[in-house]
Image (tube, grey):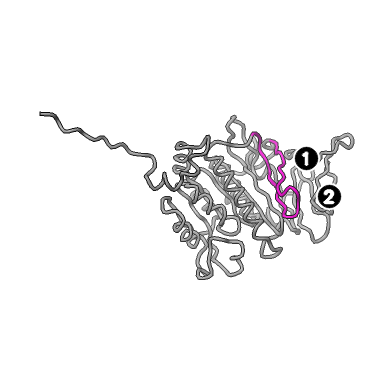
Amino acid sequence: MSMPRRTVVQDLPLDPEEYQRYGRQMIMPGFGLPSQVALKNAKVAVVGAGGLGCPVLQYLAGSGVGTIGIFDHDTVSLSNLHRQILHTTDRAGMNKSESACLALRALNTKINLIPNPVPITPSTALDLLRPYTILLDCTDRPLTRYLLSDAAIRLDIPLVSGAAISSAGQWAVYGGMRKNGAKRACYRCIWPSVLAGSGGNGRCEELGVWPVVTGMIGVGMAGEAIKLILAKEDPEPLLHLHHLGSNPLIRSIRMKGPSPKCIACGPDATITDDLEAFGYDAFCSGGDTSPETTDETGLVDGHAGMRLSVKVCAVGTRVCDCSMPPRSWISCCNRRRTKLSL
């Protein structure tokens, strides 16, 4: 008498619904099942569920990132809705992290969403962010930006940071290790100080913002996070700049490596795991404005300014070799804020 045939059931990395859900991206050359499994296994923290965070979250969730922690202690207001596309009129007054989770669960039931309606502070940052392998900063406060960068350095994870105001914005990847084993510059390497008393501290509620600008910056940030998960990084670190009135809409600037004088990631770093010991309030209100490491743009009164670390930022377009020592022009789209940077 023949023995009954035994059926061996193997665990599949994706269930049938996931194959159908993600099929359009899995059929792309160079993507396939391994990339989708990498997305499913990823654990990403998104701080801020506002103008930048909403498009970031929508595309990370839609792509199948398996675990997304959403941090935001603010509540939805009607003035948010023109750009914060996950929130709705009937959820005005609801916590943003919880509102975002409602929208994302309707989009994708196959991922793990963790709302965190609590502020991230120097005393809580490391513990709250420790479970994650990639951090996205979608906030608009200088204090939070520097805190998140410092936390990412202490946790040894990459930071994707973006900003949008009025009709312009930017995004880049900071910190962490590149595929070739080289360290990326951290946020403090490129932006070593806060420009006090100017548009450098401006927020959307004060200066306004086009919703399409936050959308473009957020989509760019989501793309960077996905590339990090899939280990498909750019050949060199880039700072991407967007202006709604420019042509092309996006320009990219090559960023150099870490600054040896950086207080967060340099060899003599003074910022430790005890983030409470660093005076973020004092730093962001006054700033460490050493003229040897920073230069200022935004010379026209009433226009937003910023600080560039000339030693760690190389402009890849329209570089003018004017004289010795080498100089380069850093210019805005309408040339009103152009300054000759040494």
Give left or right: position of 11 versus 319: left
Task: Give how far across and how far down residue 143 sits, in percent.
Answer: 63, 55
Q: Residue furthest left?
A: 1
The vertical placement of 31 against 54, above or below, is above
Give left or right: position of 79 versus 18: right
Residue 193 covered by magenta stretch: no
Q: Which residues are magenta?
A: 235-256
Query: Image point 41% across, 46% down: which residue?
Result: 18
Task: Give how far across and how far down residue 40 sits, in percent.
Answer: 44, 44
Task: Give how far across and how far down residue 253 sits, in percent.
Answer: 72, 41
The vertical placement of 76 against 242, above or below, is below
Q: Residue furthest right?
A: 323
Q: Nearer the viewer, mark 2 or mark 1?
A: 1
Sequence-first disc among 2 and 1: 1
What residue is disc 1 on? 317
Task: Give how far across and how far down residue 198 sits, in percent.
Answer: 76, 58
What residue is disc 2 on? 338
The vertical placement of 262 against 332, above or below, is above
**Any part of residue 23 in sight:** yes
Kindly identify the amino acid type of the residue bearing the numbered disc 1.
Thr
The quadrant of the picture occupied by the N terminus is top left
Kindly identify the amino acid type of the residue bearing the numbered disc 2.
Thr
**Any part of residue 130 in sight:** no
